[in-house]
Image (spheres, helix red, strand yellow):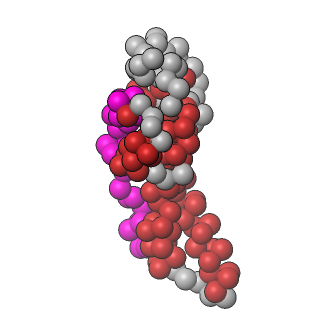
Amino acid sequence: MSCQMNPPMVKLVRTTVRHSVHEVGIVEALRYKWIESEKAGHDLGESAIRTWVRHHWNGFLRARWLEHLEGRAFWIELDQDDYGLLQHSFLDCPLKDEVLNRLKFGQENLGLINWAIDQGQDIEEVIRLLEALDINSRRIECQFYMRLAQAG
């Protein structure tokens, strides 16, 4: 069975709460700063924000992207045509859940391809799925770091 992206369904207009990865990211970075400052016994300031961005932004963004694809949350910075994509596409793809699970845990395309080869999976299906998801074009630079650093 070939893993194919199903044609897009007509999307019904519905009221969906729209979130911003940058606004929610600010909340997460400030929470991290507060927790780490409490542990240290003093305000870590800009360095804690920098640490959060360096160590957590990519994973945070990946989790939001997957929520968007699954239709669980609409993130305004992400491609609106991708919202809920997994609810109607790749339904016939037996590797979809495994690939998504590995993406959730931070694996990248090359790691997924190597896994598929090592496990004797259908590499062509994995590649078709990865090309359709196109994770590399979904990366967004963290834009709030400088704003938080200046706010002190």
Quadrant where the image shows the N terminus: top left
Residue 115 x/y as whole percent = 44, 46
Dividing the picture into quadrants, the one containing residue 80 is: top left
- Vertical comparison of 29 with 17: above or below: below
Q: Nearer the viewer, residue 118 or 26?
A: 118
- Vertical comparison of 130 with 23: above or below: above
Q: Residue at x 63, y 74 (%)?
A: 34
Q: Could you tell me if residue 82 is visible in this image?
A: yes
Q: Residue at x 45, y 57 (%)?
A: 58
Most frequent secondary structure within the magenta stretch: helix
Residue 48 x/y as whole percent = 52, 76
Q: Is residue 126 magenta?
A: yes
Residue sitting at the far bottom: 41
Q: Is residue 133 left or right of residue 41?
A: left
- Vertical comparison of 152 with 85: above or below: below
Q: Nearer the viewer, residue 2 or 139?
A: 2
Q: Is residue 50 magenta?
A: no
Q: Give the number of callouts.
A: 0
Q: Could you tell me if residue 84 is visible in this image?
A: no
Dividing the picture into quadrants, the one containing residue 3 is: top left
Q: Residue at x 64, y 86 (%)?
A: 40
Q: Which residues are magenta?
A: 124-152
Residue 91 x/y as whole percent = 52, 20
Q: Residue at x 38, y 58 (%)?
A: 143
Residue 17 x/y as whole percent = 58, 34
